[in-house]
Image (tube, helix red, strand yellow):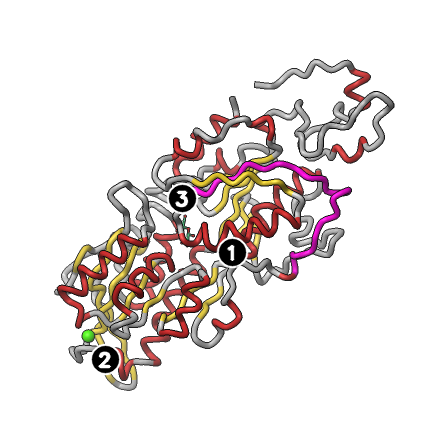
Amino acid sequence: MKKILALSLAAAMALGLAACGVGTTTAESSTPPAGETTPATGAPSAEVTNAEKPLVWFNRQPSNSTTGELDMDALSFNDNTYYVGFDANQGAELQGQMVLDYIEANIDTLDRNGDGIIGYVLAVGDIGHNDSIARTRGVRSALGTAVEVDGNVDSTPVGTNLDGTSTYVKDGSIEINGTTYTVRELASQEMKNSAGATWDAATAGNAINTWSASFGDQIDVVVSNNDGMGMAMFNAWSQANNVPTFGYDANADAVAAIANGYGGTISQHADVQAYLTLRVLRNALDGVDVDTGIGTEDDAGNVLSDDVYYYDEASRSYYALNVAVTAENYQGFLDSTVTYAPVSNQLDASAHPEKRVWLNIYNAADNFLSATYQPLLQNYDDLLNLNVEYIGGDGQTEANITNRLTNLDSYDAFAINMVKTDNAASYTYILGQ
Ligand code: BGC
Ligand code: CA
């Protein structure tokens, strides 16, 4: 519904609103005639409907959680809608390769019970989340345990598979220094708690306790779809038992744990993603090309090089590229909340006046989003002159968040992190009211 603004034509022109769509800066109308005042800094021009305001989806790409098909209605909700995430497949391949490299380099001490089987367990984040699916596939592909179904690697958790008879995986085989070893996924499970929260670290800690109590000496490697769950397993069992544990996200605690035996992690370049999340909104609000400060240097000198991200026009999606973090290079990743230097220059507040953004984190208890992503956003919001309202969800129900998607007229732009990738319409419905 378009809001009609009761302004005389003269007043509208004086305020520079006549031509003001999304993206026209109010800074252009810097000299109001006597008696007029400029709109309060950050107050959105009332004639822009909420459905027209810049919108960015991040971390969970609008898509069908069963088929992975992108939700293009959500991704092209308006002309200033984008998704920011990272390249899930490239990162998943890196994670699988990192684990395989470790096995090859440490084979002499790896097979703890000497049965010729390299047994691993896998913590799955969310069976309907494309990142989680990709990582499960990446690890299985690299270790030779993948089974294809309809041309895709099956990502179904096995439960337990001590005898190697699961049909979701197969036994892999690797030859190292002339000896052939079997690789077996002994167990895997979606780490979802009873309330429904996925990627749940506490559930992973409980799972490793259960698994290790019944077949601990068979577990040679622990792999996790993320560091939150990986560190829970490391702390609960694997550190004390010298079992290498691999995660994903390069959260600060996980990177620090590499010094104490954590096997490695993957940086999804959250420093680049958090920047992009807010930058696409800033650009739309400034009415400049979306590439400003991204592929094209902005007036403050911010620019990204194409070895850290790419843009896919068809899906209106920005993807950061991943980097493996292991014992060799972890020193440079110890603080996961520092902004990325090439895009850390403060924007000038007169040319880029303060704007208000509504932003939610789907689960305030998610290790990656709360300990890495949000602190980064909070560093960038200052640099980009954005006044961001952060809303933390419970990780379980969309309504917990959408109930707080209110007072929309006081925001200039929206940044959304859904609970489930299928649920974009719950948000766009509200924006379209
Ligand atoms: C991260 C996970 C996180 C999830 C939340 C993923 O990209 O790797 O750690 O739990 O996003 O959606
Ligand atoms: Ca073994």
Q: Residue at x 54, y 40 (%)?
A: 56
The answer to whether any part of residue 149 appears in the image is: no
Residue marked by disc 2 = 180
In the image: residue 39, left or right of residue 57: right
Q: Residue at x 35, y 57 (%)?
A: 225
Q: Nearer the viewer, mark 1 or mark 2?
A: 1
Residue marked by disc 3 = 363
**Contact (Cβ within 8 Å) of mark 3 with mark 2:** no
Is residue 261 rendered magenta in the image? no
**Contact (Cβ within 8 Å) of mark 3 with mark 1:** no
332 w.r.t. 32: above or below: below
SS for dot 1: helix
Q: Amino acid at mark 1?
A: Ala
318 w.r.t. 433: above or below: below
In the image: residue 124, left or right of residue 311: left
Tell which of 397 and 298 is nearer to you: 397
Other-residue count near label 1 (Cα within 10 Å), few / some / many at <14 / 14–19 / ≥20:
many
Tell which of 235 and 200 is nearer to you: 235
Q: Nearer the viewer, mark 3 or mark 2?
A: 3
Q: Amino acid at mark 3?
A: Asn
- Which quarter holds ligand 2? bottom left
